[in-house]
Amino acid sequence: MTTKTITVSVTRFDPERDERPRLQSYDVPFQDDLVVLDALNWIKAHADGSVSYRWSCRMGICGSCGMNVNGEPKLGCSAFLRDYLPGPVVVEPLSNFPLIRDLVIDMSSFMEKLQWVKPWIIREETALGAGEHRQTNAQIDQYRQFSMCINCMLCYSACPVIPVAPDFVGPAAIALARRYDLDSRDQAGQERLRTITGSDAIWDCSFVGECSAVCPKGVDPAQAIQQAKFESTMGMLLPWGGR
Amino acid sequence: MVSKVYPMRSHTVSAEGGCAAVLREPDSFETHAFDTIKGSDYLADQDVVEVFVREAPLEVVQLEHWGCPWSRDPDGRISVRPFGGMTTWRTCFAADKSGFHMLHTIFQTSLRHERIRRYDEFFVTSLLAEDGRCDGVIGFDIRTGAVQAIAARAVVLATGGNGRVFAFTTNGSICTGDGMALAYRAGVGLKDMEFVQFHPTGMPSTGILITEAVRGEGGYLLNADGERFCARYVPNKMELGPRDIISRAMVTEFEAGRGFDGPYGNYMHLDVRHLGEEVIDQKLPFMRELGSEYMGIDIVRDPIPVRPVEHYMMGGVDADINGATPMPGLYAAGECANVGLNGANRLGSNSLPECLVFGAAAGRAAARYARERAAPTANPIGSLVTDERRRIEGTYLDRGQGEDRVGVIRQDLQRAMDRDAGVFRTGDGLQRMADELPALRERLARARIDDVSRTFNTELVQALELEFMLDNAETIVHSALARRESRGAHARRDFTERDDERHLAHTLAFLRPGGGPRLEYRPVRITNWQPQARTY
């Protein structure tokens, strides 16, 4: 009996010996319920231990395994091989980031941008003994979708602004800024807004919405960006403006 | 803050159901303490439990102040839901992504503190522990392969569990028991390692967790005859019995021929169809997402196939109520630690508050200790780094090519652990497993390493993780072999009863070069609750 296989082509790049990335193909046993990440794990365990990629939870919540699958940004753990039959499946690193090795991108720029937008509650701290701040589920609904970001970087890979303006804070970080700005417990006022609209890059965002289209968690960063632009404009028109 | 992954990838992110804490009447500290102690099959240290239940509510409020989107009651207060083994509703939750929201809240809040220096994607290979005290860690930056020491006045291990020692587990790939192995190698005891929790409801193919909150919200567990079989085992709790008992009930039903048959073996149905779409979307949206994504079902219309799956390590680095290990300067918190809270079986939704309460305690104790001692001196550290670099590179990068692969040896370990150290155990099986471990170590020492690059060498990381996993497996198997009774999650077919006369004690496993661990025992601290029969 022959096992059914599918060809998976993976970007290989080791800066210690390669000038530029290339694709290497592997024939991987196919099963209906296998995802691209399973294929990579099979390759690493059985065919070539040197293939490098990030992964952990394999259930779409840790955000580690973002990669381009046949040119589209995906989580490797939720891209089913069956959707790419008969193959080949081309697996490449996310776009718009420096490449470290194989499928591993350098996301340190995002870690900085995340810190820029102050993704924490800004308000006077109160004693724990006084209990929780009240917040209704309707108030949570105001920011809920923006709190679902898993920092997987798919939206940065899809973003048309990042390649021309690498310092653009970018979709995920702006969504997280909105997540706190819209939280009834937060008292930051215009503090975060000034950070994200301070650079010109946000105005280059043309509401193409690629970021929202590729988000695996239903976050709508494009909406967050539009909200930020709108609030910022209101703030400029009305000296006392904003929220 | 040193982490082998970016901090928001850590496996807390996958915790779903919630975080137990006594928030308000009619709940009480006494009932939370008693539920925890009974759940532990009387192996919890009761003074630790008493502190835990009092601190947990403050930590939940702290998380709320930091922005955690806890689900709310109509009046805006933090909501609670029922959970297994808890006599009342006390589990706070953020829909069914509680761990995700807690982790991101804490990590994002930590960014406020510019003095926190992070070493992201730094793999720790050993503790600096020359004179019986911990002076920091040695490891390498995964991105560059550069081995370096990070000197510290105090070290807190918060490295999580070791579920990847098993093949069928809810745990992510990073859960390889690194912190436990680091402490074990430095001479610190690992406590109660025989107690491994099997969660009743894993997805049959992948082991992805279906949260206990599904049963908390009213889901039924059904066997192939359509019976709610829990009635035979935990008639007063039904589906909300503790995890150890429900997992055994499922395996017992399978063995009696009352399970469904599938490509991954027997399974049961977890049925939430009667809850209706609205409740499911409000309380269990992630379960619906996981069902449709990974099983092609809609849990609003279809029952969910489930089977017991390795989930949590009750044991861990021996630590006291402040997270202090017997080694000065070394602290541990969370799943990698054993502070005496969970005993032989942890109750669902007690692990997230454990992280909060004992993480805070360990941090405070480590800070106090650090203030009182001098900084480690640089001189001996330099030579230790050189030695460690030689060990790592000599063992794995500069050597001939064998045939065996790291991934294959790992799989053999995992399958053998599933076979011999699972829901039910026997002396013969555990002995067989103990006998296989040295051979697995031998194979790893001769394994082929394809990757000789210093840049992001994940094969090297996996080889070193497998060393750690073998250390973990050794302590699990030998501790289990010596415990000739059944207690909590440790169920022996050859010793089916709990034996308080001989075994109401914590196991401590110490590294003994060239053989299995040396085992010692320590009495359980009992304050108010004398051991009773554990029925539900």
Image (tube, rainbow, N blue to C red):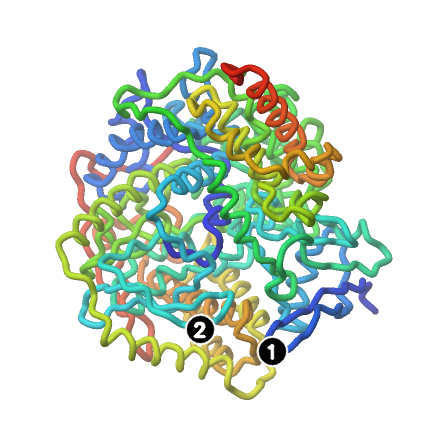
User: Dot 2: within a 10 Å radius of its alpha carbon, few (fewer than 14), some, or many (20 or more) residues?
Assistant: some
Distance CA(mark 1)–CA(mark 2): 24 Å
Number of disc labels: 2
Residue B321, position as x, y percentages in the image: 21, 45
Residue A38 vs residue B420, the one in the foreground: A38
Report helix, strand or loop for mark 2: helix
Q: Which amino acid does label 2 sit on?
A: Leu
Q: Which mark is residue B437?
A: 2
Q: Nearer the viewer, residue A7 or B104?
A: B104
Residue sticking out furthest to the top: B75
Residue located at (42% from left, 21% from top)? A185
Where is residue B432, by image quadrant? bottom left
In the image, residue A132 above or below residue A37: above
Chain under disc 2: B
Q: Residue at x 62, y 27 (%)?
A: A229
How far across and how far down the image is residue B454, in percent? 52, 74
Q: Mark 1 lies on which chain?
A: B
Q: Position of residue B356 (x, y in %)?
A: 33, 39
Q: Where is residue B185 in the image (x, y as percent from the top left)?
A: 31, 69
Camera-side residue: A237 or A213?
A: A237
Q: Which mark is residue B450?
A: 1
Check the picture and name the quadrant holding the N terminus of chain A: bottom right
Mark toward the start of the polypeptide (1 vs 2): 2
Horizontal placement of A211 versus B167: left or right?
Answer: right
Element on which disc 1 rests: loop
**Circle 1: residue type:** Asp
